[in-house]
Image: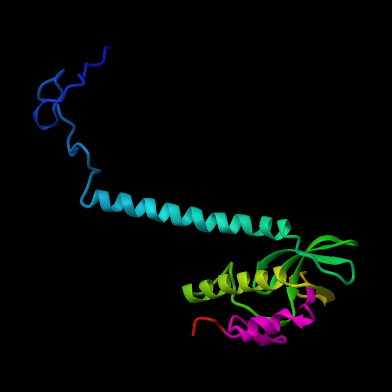
Amino acid sequence: MAKPFFGTRRGPRGTSAGTPGRRRPGRVPGRMPGRGGRVRHRLRRVLLRAGLVVGALGALAPVSDLALGLRGGGEGCRVVSVVDGDTVGLWCAETGSIRGRLVGFDAPEMFSPECTRELTQAVAATWALRRALWSAEEMTVRRQGTDRYGRALVDLRSDGVPVGQTLIAAGLARPYDGGRRAGWCD
């Protein structure tokens, strides 16, 4: 069955010169359907761009950690990435790639935040930890066992100062030595 010809010239009120009187319902040339279509379209573009920026930062962070050569000494382990404010990725000669939970402090949760305030503090704590490690002349990594999730418990010092002390002084972490942790959404 042959399709009807719709000419390229437009007649009055959106009709086609090829088939007079035929018009698609609800369609106004140059606008998205529905009320406020242009506003929704702009909002969608802004949110998409924001999502791309956040995604790019998240994807580039481990690469930037490796590119800047995060290092460490002691017991054959070196820091290769920062996961969040109190968790790092380690490369140890005897075990390979492992996750390490930094001891002595608690930072906000990045991957399961209870509120937006906790998430923003978690991002700030993560980048503060990266800055502290990137700017260090000397890093010391000392393993102290494992936690209940199988992560290595690690005492990490940047230029002889525990990194937890730096984050606590900046207000991005709290002292912690086991037990129930307080929330970050108060």
Magenta stretch holds residue 91: no
Left or right side of 109 for 17: left
Q: Quadrant of residue 179?
A: bottom right
Picture coordinates of residue 22 (x, y %)?
Answer: 14, 26
Q: Is residue 143 above or below residue 40?
A: below
Q: Quadrant of residue 125?
A: bottom right
Residue in the foreground of this view, choosing between 147 and 88 = 88
- Pick the quarter of the image with the N terminus: top left
Q: Can residue 180 be seen in this snapshot?
A: no
Q: Quick one: which residue is furthest to the top in this view?
A: 1
Q: Residue at x 18, y 38 (%)?
A: 28
Q: Give the extent of the magenta segment.
A: 153-182
Q: Residue at x 11, y 25 (%)?
A: 11
Picture coordinates of residue 138 (x, y %)?
Answer: 80, 73
Left or right side of 177 for 26: left
Magenta stretch holds residue 157: yes
Residue in the foreground of this view, choosing between 49 and 178 = 49
Q: Is residue 15 above or below residue 55?
A: above
Picture coordinates of residue 19 (x, y %)?
Answer: 14, 19
Picture coordinates of residue 114 (x, y %)?
Answer: 51, 74
Q: Residue at x 59, y 67 (%)?
A: 111
Q: Residue at x 27, y 53 (%)?
A: 39
